[in-house]
Image: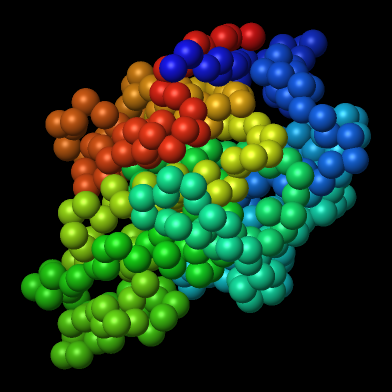
Amino acid sequence: MQESKVFFTNFRATVNENLLQKLRRLLIAAGIKEIDFDGKYTAIKIHFGEPGNLAYLRPNYAKVVVDLIKELGGKPFLTDCNTLYVGNRKNALDHMDAAYLNGFSPFSTGCHVIIADGLKGTDEIYVPVEGGEYVKEAKIGRAVMDADIVISLSHFKAHEGAGFGGAIKNIGMGCGSRAGKMEMHSSGKPSVTQSACIGCGMCVKNCAHSAITITNKKASIDHNKCVGCGRCIGVCPKDAIHEGESHSNDILNKKMVEYTAAVIKGRPHFHISLVMDVSPFCDCHAENDAPIVPDVGMFASFDPVALDMACADAVNKQPILANTYLDEAEHIHNDHFCDIHPTTNWKSQISHAEKMGLGTSKYQLVTI
C-alpha cells in the first residue's frame, strides 16, 4: 500500500501566528477543504473530559475546526457517546453538564453539543461491519450515523487498556453506544488478588453494574454482572485487581477498529490529533497524572491509521519526563506505551486496522 501523508506542525508560536491560527493552517495544508461540506451535517467527535481531569483538549482548538467547517458551508456539531462506567458522563444530561463545565458550549465553540446515543445511551443504530472478525453489527450512537461527515479531534495519550488513545480509539470506542462499549469490553473480565486487597471500597464505588462486593475486607467480582470495562483496575490503590485473559486487550483493540470501520466507511472523514499533555491514562479518569513526555505538536490526515502510527512514533522518540508515571516504570520494552502498561499491545490496533482496510501504517510526515 502507498504511503499516506500525515501533516505536522509543532507548538512553537510567533507574534504573527498563534497556535490556533497554526492549527487552521495545518488543517488546510492537510486537505480538509477537499471535502464537500456544503449543507452537510458534520460530526466532530471529541472527548469532553471527565470533570476533574485537566488533560483534555481545550475548547479553543475545537472552535478552530468548527469555524473552518462553517466557512466551508458545513453544519458542525461536537459529539460523544455516553460512558459505561460511573462518572459524570453516563447519561446525556450529566454529560452535557460536564461538557459545559469544561468549556464546550455553543458560545465558546460556535456549535452545539449533541450526545450521540441519547438520554440514557440507548439511542443507537446497528451498523453492519463488513469483514468484522469480532463484530458483525456495531452499535453506534444515532447522531454520529445521521451525520454526513465525521471529523475526529483527538487528544493523543496513553491508555490502560488500548495502549494509547488516538483517532481509532476516539472514533471506535467513543462512537459506540453504552451497549456498544459493553460489547467492546466484554472479552476479558478482571479478578481480585485477595492477598493484596485492603477492602478500601474504591472498586465498589466505581462499578456501574454492582458487580463488586466486599466480604471480610476483601473484594470479589461477580463475572455474571461485570461487563469488563476495567474501571476498577484503574482506581485500585494497591494494584490488587488484574485483567482477565492475557489476550483481552488485543481483542479490545480489534473490536475498537471494527467499530471505527462501522463509523467511517462509506462517507467522508478527516482526523486531527494533538500530542500534548500526554497523560498515562484515559481522559475518562476524573484526574490526570503528569505528562510523561514533552508536548510534541499537532497532526492531521485523511488516514486514521497513518495518523495514529505517526503520533505513536513521535511519542516514543521523546525523552521521559522526570517524576512521572513513565519515569517510575520499568523500561524494558523500548516503547513508552508498553513500559507504562505492559499487558497492552497498541500495535494490534494498527495491524487490525490495516487488515480492515482503514489505512496504512506507512506514512510520509509533511512538516508545515
In the figure, is residue 128 to the left or right of 61? left
Question: In this orientation, does residue 23 appear?
Answer: yes
Q: Is residue 144 above or below residue 28?
A: below
Along the line of sight, the residue nearer the viewer: 234 or 258 = 258
In the figure, is residue 272 to the left or right of 239? right
Residue at 17% from the left image edge and 37% from the top image edge: 330
Instruction: Give the position of the C terminus as an image quadrant.
Output: top right
In the figure, is residue 240 to the left or right of 83? left
Question: In this orientation, does residue 290 appear?
Answer: no
Q: Is residue 31 above or below residue 54?
A: above
Asked where in the image residue 76 lies, by quadrant, the reply is top right
Instruction: Give the position of the N terminus as an image quadrant.
Output: top left
Residue 187 in the image: state x and y as whole percent.
30, 62
Asked where in the image residue 322 lies, by quadrant, the reply is top left
Residue 321 in the image: state x and y as whole percent.
35, 29
Residue at 37% from the left image edge and 72% from the top image edge: 227
Residue at 71% from the left image edge and 66% from the top image edge: 97
In the figure, is residue 49 to the left or right of 319? right
Residue at 21% from the left image edge and 26% from the top image edge: 334
Q: Is residue 365 above or below residue 244?
A: above
Q: Is residue 160 above or below residue 209?
A: above
Along the line of sight, the residue nearer the viewer: 216 or 47 = 47
Along the line of sight, the residue nearer the viewer: 113 or 354 = 354
Which residue is the extreme one toward the front? 130
Residue 60 in the image: state x and y as whole percent.
74, 38
